[in-house]
Image (tube, helix red, strand yellow):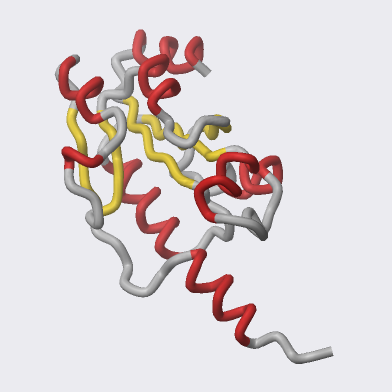
Amino acid sequence: MRARVEQWREKGQWIAFANGCFDLLHPGHISLLTQAKRAADRLVVGLNSDLSVTRLKGPGRPVQAEVARAMVLASPACVDAAVIFSEDTPLRVIEQLLPDVLIKGSDYTVDKVVGADTVIQRGGQVLLVDLIPKQSTTNTVNRLGANKRPS
């Protein structure tokens, strides 16, 4: 991934980076990714590994395995590449790729965005994008669980 990012950068292209679990891709994710792509020429998306998602979200998550999530996540035209990371945060990936723009949802503040210091120190920016209300994988999973019929 680092070599591909360097090729893009050599062509003068700006690189954006967004990350998350992306367990069940929903309209909120698509909106975030679309807004992220508007901020740069290329969009790389960091994807938490299965073990990382379980540590962050608890037992029963992720719903989909990391390879399936990566395939789905790489499918929208706005995503140029997806990379799976095993840590709980994407800091190591951000330090290796050094994106020009770091993207998170507006439910964050810049001081809470992992890797913001790294990106800002090299002249990049952090962009907090608008979220679609009530769109979350956790809410969807909870609704599905509430709709289960007893055996």
Tell me which corner region of the image, top left, top right, bottom left or bottom right, holds residue 144: bottom right
Q: In the picture shown, does residue 54 fall above or below 114?
A: below
x and y percentages locating residue 106 in the rendered image = 23, 55
Q: Residue at x 43, y 57 (%)?
A: 30
**Residue 68 left/right relative to 73:** right
In the picture, the quarter occupied by the C terminus is bottom right
Residue at image point 31% right, 72% down: 133
Provide residue 104's location: percent of width, then percent of height.
30, 45
Residue 102 falls in image quadrant: top left
Please state if 29 lies on the left or on the right of 117 as rendered: right
| For residue 103, side relative to residue 45 (left or right) | left
Front residue of 57 and 105:
57
The number of discs equals: 0
Residue 76 location (% of width, % of height): 52, 48
Which residue: 38% across, 39% down? 18
Residue closest to the far right = 151
Q: Residue furthest bottom?
A: 150
- Is 95 located above or below residue 130 in the figure? above
Q: Position of residue 137 (x, y in %)?
A: 51, 64
Left or right? Give the position of 136 relative to 55.
left
The answer to which of 6 and 148 lies nearer the viewer is 148
